[in-house]
Image: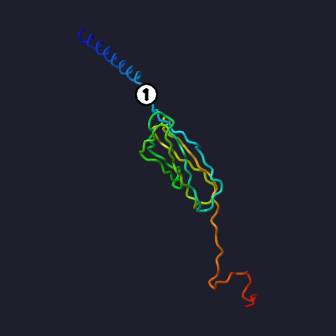
Amino acid sequence: MKKAIFTISSVLLLAVFAKAQETGKASTPASTSLAEITFETDAHDFGTIEYAGNGTYEFKFKNTGKEPLIISNAKGSCGCTVPTYPKDVPIKPGESNVIKVTYDTKRAGNFTKTVTITSNAKTPEKVISIKGVVQPAVVEEAFPANGKKDDGATPLERHY
């Protein structure tokens, strides 16, 4: 009899404890940041760029939130796209700054690349993008060892 009462009491106590834990979790509000990152534009089209030309663009943004904004990381979608961002520098509410994105223009052809920005903003990840076309490298005409341009004539046809 004592054993049965002890078992029933233990089960009831466990049930009450489990319910208390569940209620405690549900009543704890999720923490939300009041920082917010707002870009003037989240995409840039370079158009056509010369081979080895300027492939850098500055994305301007503002902290439109109510708390300081801290950017913890910015990562390009490949090694040819390198972002530079204000590291561990709090951007106060209302302040602006830039994230510089540089594309390696020694790669001819069309490109579309992204940069993922991680911060303490309401939306912790934001993606910005760049695109364009890099022209092929200009190849200068090679001259033969004698310094004369090859006119296409055979040695017998040439009159020196």
Colour scheme in use: rainbow
Residue at coordinates 62% horizontally, 53% vertically from top-left? 46
Horizontal side of 146 relative to 152 (left or right) equals left
SS state under label 1: loop
Horizontal side of 152 relative to 108 (left or right) equals right
| Residue farthest along the bottom direction in this orientation | 160
Tell me where residue 47 appears, x and y as whole percent: 65, 53
Tell me where residue 35 appears, x and y as whole percent: 47, 35
Q: Nearer the viewer, residue 90 or 148?
A: 90
User: Which residue is label 1 attached to?
Assistant: 30
Number of callouts in the render? 1
Tell me where residue 85 appears, x and y as whole percent: 48, 48
Q: Is residue 129 above or below residue 27?
A: below
Circle 1: is it few (<14), some (14-19), or many (20+) Cα within 10 Å? few
Q: Quadrant of residue 110?
A: bottom right
Residue at coordinates 29% horizontally, 12% vertically from top-left? 9
Q: Is residue 63 above or below residue 105?
A: above
| Residue farthest along the front direction in this orientation | 94
Q: Mark 1: which amino acid?
A: Ala
